[in-house]
Image (cartoon, coloured by chain):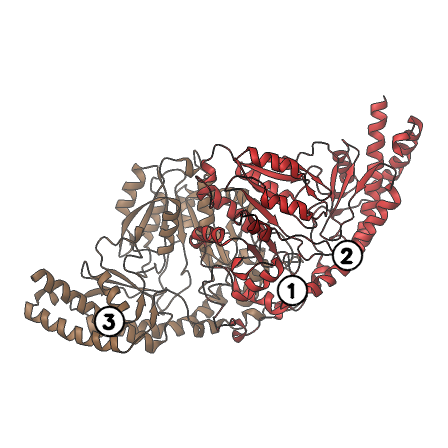
Chain colours: A red, B brown
Amino acid sequence: MISDFSKEQWSAVYRAAKDEFSTYCTRCLNLDMSRGKPSSLQLNVTEGLLQALQTNEDCYGEEGTDYRNYGILNGIPEARRFFAELFEVPAENVVVGGNSSLNMMYDSIVTAMLFGVPGSVRPWSREKKIRWICPAPGYDRHFAICESLGIEMIPVEMKADGPDMDRIEELCAADDSIKGMWSVPKYSNPEGKTYSDEVVRRLASMKAAPDFRIYWDNAYIVHDLADKSDKLLNLFDECVKAGNPNRVLTFTSTSKISFPGSGVAAMAASEDNIKALNAVKTFQTIGPDKLNQLRHVRYFKNKQGIVEHMKRHAEYLRPHFDVALKELNLQLKDDGYATWTVPNGGYFLSLDLVDGSAKRVEELMKQAGVVITPAGAAFPYHHDPKDRNLRIAPTYPPVEELETCIRLLCVCVKLATAERHLKSAN
Amino acid sequence: MISDFSKEQWSAVYRAAKDEFSTYCTRCLNLDMSRGKPSSLQLNVTEGLLQALQTNEDCYGEEGTDYRNYGILNGIPEARRFFAELFEVPAENVVVGGNSSLNMMYDSIVTAMLFGVPGSVRPWSREKKIRWICPAPGYDRHFAICESLGIEMIPVEMKADGPDMDRIEELCAADDSIKGMWSVPKYSNPEGKTYSDEVVRRLASMKAAPDFRIYWDNAYIVHDLADKSDKLLNLFDECVKAGNPNRVLTFTSTSKISFPGSGVAAMAASEDNIKALNAVKTFQTIGPDKLNQLRHVRYFKNKQGIVEHMKRHAEYLRPHFDVALKELNLQLKDDGYATWTVPNGGYFLSLDLVDGSAKRVEELMKQAGVVITPAGAAFPYHHDPKDRNLRIAPTYPPVEELETCIRLLCVCVKLATAERHLKSAN
């Protein structure tokens, strides 16, 4: 264990790591492990989707409606039922939109800023202050929305089974200016954790402002990697049971099921929430791209079709996670350099280093030609208070490149840790 | 001419119209002439678009980029050039978006409300009052956006060659709270008028607030009906020449070129305007549906392809306009019951009746089973100060139904006019 290392041992680690690092630097690498996206090879598993609609006759819905034309603000009934089966909620509680669930989330928050939500006294933008619960580490684009709209973020620590509920309950009970909370409740970004039933129930039933909203970004709803898949309790149902039906807005999309840029996004929410959002959305658009919705339903058919399809994605992704975990185990396991998560699904690994070394590792990686997600990116205001967390996105690079990246990462972790120890020893 | 009619003549008109109206009522019609949309038959001219992308290999752009994946906020370069040719502006001034130009307009105004635009002192929502120039009659969904966001609308009369520029110049020079103006400058909705070169030049060069923006909704940019097509001066160029490059945001879409619900929308604007909008949009979405953009470019190829395609739309639409105009001419011409426009393009006719009779005609049509665009819909706050304007949307119903609708309309116009005269004579 590194906690027992003598100064001489650290010097030896430093020299060995420095040598290895220098060798990597001479290789002129130019690799990118920064974003959680599928590679082109992986996207090929969805071949055939584009052929699901071909002729004029293909464009009519189950009730004879011509889906090429304007209208149908909530999305086509076929797609609402399709996502209802995924969300496990009634189809009338589902709205199917365009190609981006982030866009739906953003628009719904902007709508709340300008008009409020059911339960609001006034538009959120007219409140003195709006605050938001941000389990951290979390998804950088969630936090960026708050930052851009001037919503104050309150980081809350992620535990093994979800965010620190004692803290969240305490905060929400005491402060009506807390209007929302981000969450990626299944295979969380970046840690791959899934909220426990207890966490879900406490979120549903805790005391909070009447216009408090949980943004339940179920981005990895069917994105299992392993045979063993995590089960997430249905927050929508729990909120109904707890008498807080308006508390949750659930989102997902097919971005990582079909195509990241040309998928279909959907939201599940209470009748009141949908009605309030539509009262604004009706001014924004005449309707979503219904043909792309139909294309997806025709291709995937139903949840069973999606589950089968996701196995093909998993077959592609598993070797990426396997090689990353193998290298981490080989180089860093049990030595005390780092701990990491071993998720059953999702798109990320999360690495916790010795405090104060994440930024340095990012810097070293960059020097050697590998871009990783910036240290701190997974925290509100890009600020990791312990400067220890790195998000690893193993999905995009080819396996051989990924192997190189992770080996280099382990070298950089050792080098950065040794630097810190030697510096503090001086 | 009805202005010379005696009371007896009006009584005779009333009785004849009333009889005819009663006969229509017994036919139990159930027709809709309310919205300016293509019929399914018309949409069939775009067969083949859905086959433009079929395989994995089809999804790569000209520089090898995989358009299935995330990213490219401004749209794919192929589509930016494609719309640049239509707009007659440089491609770097074009942003290509999702399926709805209305959505792009709405989002850009919401962005201005929350953050302002280049030239703003503060976000528009923090101004005491925001006002907007609304040439009327105009597009109901434009006005609805203002109404929903609490922007005060100032109606300005439409003349033969565009809005009353004397009035607009006077208003904008005197009042910095006027932040914008709606316009459908070519084949205007609903009158089918095209702004003259002089109007365009005056809009470009007039005095106005530094953050005044003209929303130039060039929805019918290539939507000619006749062999003779209207020419619209390029406001983007004129604004640059006049030293007001940020004044105009130009929009269009393929909604009435390909499919209304699954087309591609685009905006042209100055570099500063695009930069300011993107600074916000980058939080809203990772990017538009690039495959649908590519599908459109592959299918239509370029402006010449669009122009050829629009001839096929015109072949379908012309009989609709012809039959409507034929009936109006047969029943109402030169009698003084109404005047109407004979546009060279677009989707509408606009009918001006005797003052105070539009609502009554709408009501009578409804009684007889035909829905038309509500009287007043083409005016800010749904208020036609003279209650005389009706928008006729001849495109959607089959020609025979349309013929029935217009014949009935003429009967209702006569009946409503006679009612008014007889009432005022009593």
Residue at the spot 61% in from the left edge and 54% down from the top edge: A252
- Nearest-to-viewer mark from 1 and 3: 1
- Nearest-to-viewer mark from 2 and 3: 2
Query: In this view of the protein, which residue sits in the foreground, B147 or B328?
Result: B147
Q: Amino acid at mark 1?
A: Lys
Q: Would you identify the image quadrant in which residue B211 lies?
A: top left
Residue that badge 3 annotates: B328
Q: With respect to residue A384, does A188 lie above or below?
A: below
Residue that badge 1 annotates: A303
Instruction: Give x and y (percent) for residue A372.
Output: 73, 43
Secondary structure, mark 2, is: loop
Query: In this view of the protein, which residue sits in the foreground, B183 or A80?
Result: A80
Residue that badge 2 annotates: A228
Instruction: Give x and y (percent) for residue B219.
Output: 41, 59
Q: Residues within 10 Å of mark 2 (few under 14, many from 20)?
A: few
Chain letter of the residue beneath label 3 in the structure image: B
Residue at the spot 31% in from the left edge and 73% down from the top edge: B322
Residue B89 is at least partly visible in this image: no
Which quadrant, please, contains the N terminus of chain A?
A: top right
Left or right: where B155 falls relative to B282: left
Secondary structure, mark 3, is: helix
